[in-house]
Image (cartoon, rainbow, N blue to C red):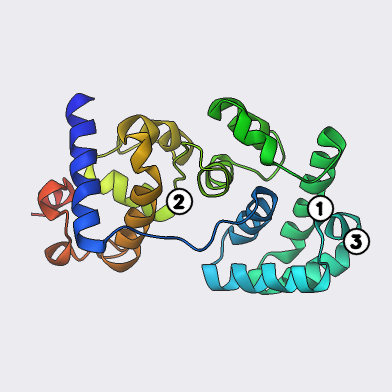
Amino acid sequence: MKNLKSRAVKIHNTLLQAFGEPIWRNPLPAIDELVSTILSQNTNDVNRDRGFNALRAKLPTWESVRDANVEDVIAAIRPAGLANQKGPRIQQVLRAITEERGSLNLDFLAGLPVEEARAWLTKFNGVGPKTAAIVLCFSLNMPAFPVDTHIYRVSGRTGLRPEKMTVEQAHPHLESVFPPETYYAAHLNLIRLGREICGARKPNCPKCPINKLCEYKEKTK
């Protein structure tokens, strides 16, 4: 594990040299990020944002989203795809949070240990490890490492995780491999690497900045 941690840091530093210090969009309030991330499931960032912005334009408070006719929510978020599933899911989560907390504010999570905050979020139907980690990392500045399809693919090819490890198992594993202070930048730069170079069908190994740190090329000689 010590060697793996050392290689993870080298990969992180190499990606920083290649891509620079990444900055995501301005942080959203945690409840906003939660809904946005649910909308992001099985779609791209552009469609996610279109659905999110349309929902906020039609129903400008989360209370109004929670209490609206489900057909209105579905119609608003249609650009994000899978609206018939995501609309009821968003409303169910908002209602469950209200029932437990009395309001739609998740800032209290920042005062909890990260594992307790993660467990609190993932008990809601439709909120998995990635969604919870995104809320914790990007909205609440807590040490959580979200694993999306790009990071899962890249971490497998580079040998940062066991080949047969599941996505769910990859979250705590990569959190143990990368130092907490690197989570934000490492997450974003690994996604960029997966999108631009380490593609699903054919990775562009000759142009990869971490080629010398990657195990995948050994399998393709």
Q: Which residue appears at 71% of the width and 41% of the height?
A: 125
Q: Badge 2 is on which residue? A: 148
Q: Earlier in the sequence, mark 2 or mark 1?
A: 1
Q: Is label 2 in a helix, a strand or a loop?
A: loop
Question: Residue 175, located in which quarter of the rendered image?
Answer: top left
Can residue 40 be seen in the rendering of this structure?
Answer: yes
Can residue 200 be seen in the rendering of this structure?
Answer: no
Label 3 neighbour load within 10 Å: few <14, some 14-19, many 20+: few
Residue 167 image point, x, y percent: 45, 41
Measured Cα–Cα span from mark 2 to mark 1: 24 Å
Q: Which residue appears at 65% of the width and 43% of the height?
A: 127
Please, is residue 28 above or below residue 164 in the view? below
Q: Which residue appears at 30% of the width and 45% of the height?
A: 155
Name the one closer to the observer, 150 or 55. 55
Residue 91 is tagged as: 1
Q: Is label 1 in a helix, a strand or a loop?
A: helix
Please, is residue 18 above or below residue 158 in the view? below
Name the one closer to the observer, 85 or 19. 19
Q: Which residue appears at 70% of the width and 41% of the height?
A: 106
